[in-house]
Amino acid sequence: MFSVFLQRVYLLVFILLLPAICVAADSKGVKASEGSSAKEALLLPSGANASAGVEGKVDLSPDIIISNATEGLLKSIKGAEQSEKTIQFYYDLVDEKVSPIVDFPLIARRVMGRYYRLASAEDRERFVVTFKESLLKTYAKGIAGYTNETLVFLPFKGVQSRKGKLKAKVEMEIRSPSEPPILVAYQMFQNKQKEWKLENIVLNGINLGLTFRNQFSESYKANAGDFSKVIGQWNDVDTK
């Protein structure tokens, strides 16, 4: 089933947000040692990863933003009592730590594709909410069932300008003793507020944004263009 495939994809992607052993790579491709020194390499801005902004502020680059989200999740989970670690706990945690760096409205619009213009303003808003909730629920389940993996942050290649917009790609490799490595690429952009936001993920060559768009298109056709049914079924399909 297509939904089962997506479920596996979600879980794999979330592993990269909660590494038990973080192995960082600096701008020259030199790996940091495991443990606390690796975390320092992830969290402390360097000349290649940060720049001084107005009023002495530090503008974190996309790779540091992803790393900080990782650290925030890990700290919160380690600091919580076992009795507190319910699915709702993980859901709220993901919403707090991850949602701020994801542009859900933009991703949802792209997922709707050409059907976005056919939808009412209410249907568009409903899908943004439903799309976000479906991801957060699945991610919460992914954290709850997390198993230790080794994560390698590949050298950050810097920010690029495309058609007047700043873009960046943060690449990571998930390594397991028994499985081939999994390459994950976070595609990010800088919005009008000068904030770096996640706009897509490519997992081992699989474009998740395109995968979601194809799923929406298939559902739209199967439901004869009834947006209420498409949106209503989306949450059911992605969280089973």
Image (spheres, rainbow, N blue to C red):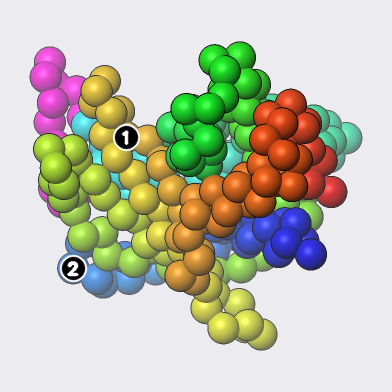
Q: Earlier in the sequence, mark 1 or mark 2?
A: 2
Q: What residue sits 43% from the left and 32% below the top? A: 106
Please provide percent x and percent y for residue 29.
24, 71
In the rendered structure, which segment of residues is drawn in magenta? 43-58
- Identify the amino acid type marked 1: Trp
Tell me where residue 96 appears, x and y as whole percent: 58, 26
Q: Nearer the viewer, residue 189 or 157?
A: 189
Task: Answer with left or right where residue 239 lies relative to residue 102.
Answer: right
How crowded pointer 2 is (Cα within 10 Å; few <14, some 14-19, many 20+) is rated as few
Give the structural element (helix, strand or loop) at label 1: strand
Residue at the outermost right position: 83
Q: Is residue 234 visible?
A: no
The residue beneath circle 2 is 28
Where residue 85 appears, as percent x and y from the top left, is 81, 37
Amino acid type of the residue that numbered disc 2 sits on in the rendered structure = Lys
The residue at 26%/20% (across/down) is 193
Reply above or below: 180 against 48: below
Label number found at residue 196 = 1
Task: Name the quarter where the N terminus is drawn.
Answer: bottom right
Between residue 3 and residue 158, name the one nearer to us. 3
